Image (cartoon, helix red, strand yellow):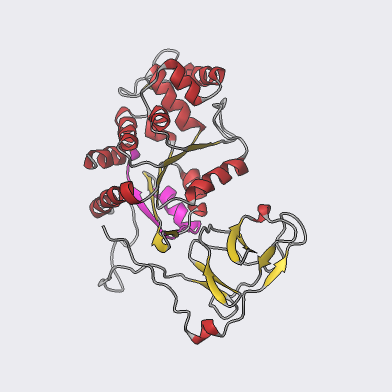
Amino acid sequence: MKLQEYCAPDFSDPVFENAPDAGVEAAQEDGIAPRGFHATSIFPEYFKIGGEWKLIRHSRMDCAVVIKDGEPLAVEPRSIAKGDKVVIGRAEDGACGIFLNTLPFEAPGDESDGFSFRGSRTRETSYSRDYDSLYELLRYEKKHGFCIWVLGPACTFDYDSRRAMVGLIHKGYVQAMFAGNALATHDIEAAVFKTALGQDIYSQRSVRGGHYHHLDTINMVRECGSIRSFIEKRGISDGIMAACIKKNIPYVLAGSIRDDGPLPDVIADVYEAQSKMRALIRQATTVITLATQLHAIAVGNMTPCYTVKNGLVRPVHFYTVDISEFAVGKLHDRGSLSARSIVTNVQDFLVNVERNLE
């Protein structure tokens, strides 16, 4: 597989050569950026510092830019410290020492007319090529990249999709996983009771007293102190969480106001959860979000369209998969312009992907 090549700016252009250094102003208080501060996007951004144009290596949307040791760093406004040198200025064409590269990667040729049918991606879109491209990408990333999967609870409600996700973990296509309390709870419930929210995960029939199963699951895990302790103590080898633990796959379970319990591994402080997610996103080369609108938007807003590996700028691929057109479109509307959407049943998606990566 050949990745898209990075289209680097020509900094020998007089506009760049004659530009001043990016303006900076010291923060007067912790957690407060100077007025007129520059905010980052998903695109590569360069700042002229000491006469040299420098790229932010680890960016994310809606951060301030702090200059430390001559390097630009994307910093959440809440993490700004008094005295930090914060970049100010909102012109992004290079003339004021700030340049936003909005066309970072070569695009395939488009020979279509100005007008065409079916320009948006909906349930009527043909996704055959998308699947083929994804299989090729995942085989490449297994050896060369870092793939993060973001899972909604629907991934574990079905026997076959749950088994397919476990297969992807064991085959080495998952380097990290993000989810919430529900995914982990119902996955462990399935391992213990063979149900999810009280329904048999294969037949989808409700079982007597099944509405207690997820609550009993949470209670049992809390009694053990952690998911790992529970799985090891009970000798559980079935399911997504057991596979992550067996393969030492890092995971972040972010809490919600809706949570029951929650499980002891769930991070209730949303900013702590965000920080742990961002630490892994800095390593990401591909992100795949499945049937989780809010988690998908959150991760999309933290994920730039590029990363730097071995000194080279390469794309970060972002897929969002949901049966709802609204859910996949919402991510694009919130600024994650590089996200590729597939409108389909997430259970079918997982089974297809796992089977084609045999």
Q: Quadrant of the rendered structure where residue 241 is? A: top left
Task: Give the camera-side residue of 259 and 163.
Answer: 163
Q: Residue furthest right?
A: 28
Where is residue 182 shown, x and y percent of the image? 48, 31
Q: Image point 62% across, 44% down: which residue?
A: 271
Identify the residue shown where x is 42% and y is 36%. 249
User: Residue pushed farthest top?
Assistant: 208
Q: Identify the residue at image location x=46%, y=47%.
A: 296
Q: Position of residue 253 (x, y in %)?
A: 51, 36
Where does residue 24 sit, x and y in percent of width and height? 68, 70
* 28 or 355: nearer the viewer: 28
Q: Locate residue 244 relative to residue 15 in the image: left or right.
A: left
Magenta run includes residue 326: yes
The magenta stretch is: 325-346
Against 146, is 67 above or below?
below
358 relative to 177 in the view: left or right: left
Front residue of 307/152: it is 307
User: Where the N terminus falls, by quadrant?
Assistant: bottom left
Judge whether residue 338 is colored magenta: yes
Which quarter shows the C terminus?
Answer: top left
Total numbered labels: 0
Asked where in the image residue 270 lies, by quadrant, the reply is: top right
Residue 108 in the image: x percent, y percent? 29, 68
Q: Residue at x 53, y 59 (%)?
A: 59
Judged left or right of residue 156, residue 333 is right
Position of residue 153 relative to residue 38, above or below, is: above
Q: Between 164 and 275, which is closer to the camera in this rendering?
A: 275
Q: Is residue 40 visible?
A: yes
Q: Can residue 35 be seen here?
A: no
